[in-house]
Amino acid sequence: MNTLDPDHCYQALCSHDRRFDGRFFVAVSSTGIYCRPVCPARTPKRENCRFYQHAAAAEQAGYRPCLRCRPELAPGLSTLEIPDQLLSQACRLISHGFLHQHSLAQLAARLGISDRHLRRLFDQYYGVSPSQYVQSQKLLQAKQLLTDTPLPMAEVAALSGFGSNRRFNSLFQQHYRLTPSQLRQSARSASAPTAQARLYLSYRPPCDWPALLAFLQQRSIAGVEQVDAQCYRRTLSWPGPDGLIQGWICTKPEPERHRLVLTCSENLNPVLPALQQQVRQLFDLDCDPQPIINQLGPLAQARPGLRLPSCFDGFEMAVRAILGQQITVKAAHTLAGRLAAQFGQPLATPWPELHCCFPQPARIASLQPAQLAELGIIRQRGTAIIALAQAVDTGSIQLSPLAPVEQTLAQLQALPGIGPWTAQYIAMRALAWPDAFPDTDLGVIKALGTKRRKEILARAEHWRPWRAYAVMHLWHGATDTTAQDEAS
């Protein structure tokens, strides 16, 4: 099991150091409660503290979550911060709901390992079995939905991955010593009830929200996304229990509380946990900035809180990347808006600027290059977009953080019109790969002051495994970024 230094943990607890939020949990033997290191409650005595790598380990030891600091809101860990790659993949699949439809045996098979090896991995790092880890994740998800949404109990149970209400109620009371109804009543007495779900997503500071929102605003798609200095809104189509669900989300940062507030249209309630995970990914909320700052050195000094924005929809982002080949960000923004308006699905929202969903891969796959040319998209890029749509629609290419990076890069570059720059950019944002590096990008070339590829790659070697974050620092401050794709 990964060992924690109790003295260092207690020091972080005493200072309420937010850099350690989600990196460990403190259980207090005198109260039977476990907390985040940023809990505002009075600091317990050192001799009463026990420190755990994961909330599941604290719960397995018999502690229940604090109702004040709410451990379910603690930020997670990024892919590279979990030392074992297989364990990292397992945790990511679990967080994306894989076990809601599959068994632990199927999870092990997906990873190419035995059930026994999967159990060994979880025990070595977290000190719990995979079943205990998953059960804790489900209960914490249910706790958040009970606290922050008006969803019926049965719906909370189903969304959290429980097969029956009886099982849900039994486990909840057993672990938390409260019934789900009692927890909800307690939460509502502490704050005004809301008719709409408002989910809170925490992160570790620093986070440069102005730079993050400005980046997304420059690359937004008219009609689909709306970004300003205070919030990010968008329409979306999402797979639901009975087919695609269309709706909207609105996110607002609360920097003073180190969290993001997510609200959704009510028809998206059946997919809230999946949307919550996708928003965390979009804003890179599970990032731990300190290791990145240490690795990038002087490059990160001016903007230590820069994040690596992912995307909400991998296909949408990849189309946007193809449109951005060898043209300005503004021009690509215009073309993407035309594409959405012409072939997307109309949708009514509270904001007139948001009026359609981005077209699904099947819709784009059915088009001819001439139809895209009518929007001002040159034939070469139109052909690339259609080929990509066909590959995504058939499932031969997956554009999400669950996809294997090297294999996906090779598949992308095998498509017409997609070369190294486009593939690496897609890896940065759709695959959320922190070591992606589009070395032929003109913004990178200008920032480094050389066109020599070997020299650029040699300098970037010092930034591994965070080269994508280095790219964000190199790009920052550019008012208009152009890029080239050598092999398109």
Image (spheres, helix red, strand yellow):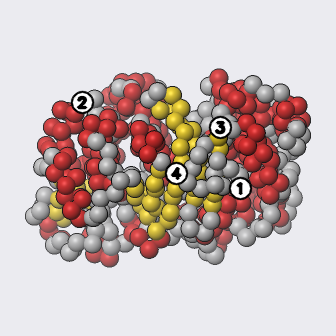
In front: mark 3 or mark 1?
3
Give the mark, 4 or 1, whose residue is nearer the N terminus: 1
Question: How far apart are labels 4 and 3 at the CA level?
Answer: 16 Å
* Quadrant housing the C terminus: top right
Position of residue 29 relative to residue 387, above or below, is: below
For mark 4, give the secondary structure. strand
**Which residue sits at x=41%, y=38%?**
270
Q: What residue is shown with label 1?
A: 219
In front: mark 2 or mark 3?
3
For mark 1, give the secondary structure. loop
Q: What residue is shown with label 2?
A: 164
For mark 2, give the secondary structure. loop
Q: Where is residue 97 drawn, in percent x and y?
A: 41, 36
Give the mark, 2 or 1, whose residue is nearer the N terminus: 2
**Which residue sits at x=73%, y=70%?**
477
Q: What residue is shown with label 3?
A: 345
Q: Which mark is residue 64?
A: none
Q: Is residue 482 left or right of residue 114?
A: right
**Which residue sits at x=19%, y=55%?**
185
Q: Quadrant of residue 293?
A: bottom right
Q: What residue is shown with label 4?
A: 249
For mark 3, give the secondary structure. strand
Q: Decide: marks 2, 3 in contact (CB < 8 A)?
A: no
Name the amino acid type tagged 4. Answer: Ile
Mark yes or no: residue 79 visible.
no
Q: Where is residue 467 drawn, in percent x and y?
A: 65, 56
Q: Quadrant of residue 186?
A: bottom left
